[in-house]
Image (cartoon, rainbow, N blue to C red):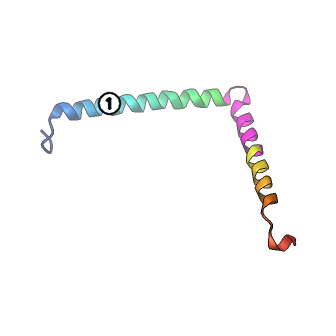
Amino acid sequence: MKNGIPNVYWSFRSAWSATHLVMLAILTIWLAGWLLQDSRGEQMFNDGSAWVEDLSSQLASWVPFPWDA
């Protein structure tokens, strides 16, 4: 017993945490490999960047700035 909690709980919690860390590591490695393959990550970044810049310019055109008058 640790702090009034049975040892089985701590064993299960440690095993569950380790399992999740392993799954997260595998998913991260797979995602990094997928993004690096055929420049997918660069293409997605460029597309997202262009979308954000377009949105920014659209919003800026709707807001009148005092120095543009």
Q: Residue at x 56, y 26 (%)?
A: 30
Q: Which residue is drawn at 25% across and 30% down?
A: 12
Residue 55 x, y percent position in the rendering: 75, 50
Asked if 54 appears above or below 6 in the picture, the reply is below
Residue of label 1: 16
Q: Which residue is drawn at 80% across and 69% down?
A: 65
Overall secondary structure of the magenta stretch?
Answer: helix
Residue 61 x, y percent position in the rendering: 82, 58
Asked if 54 appears above or below 46 in the picture, the reply is below
**Where are the magenta residues, as a range?**
36-50
Quarter occupied by the N terminus = top left
- Give left or right: position of 62 versus 45: right
Residue 46 x, y percent position in the rendering: 75, 40
Residue 13 x, y percent position in the rendering: 27, 34
Comparing 63 with 21, the one in front is: 63
Comparing 39 with 53, the one in front is: 53
Q: Does the magenta stretch include residue 38?
A: yes
Q: Within 10 Å of the Cα at label 1, are there few (<14), some (14-19), or many (20+) other Cα atoms?
A: few
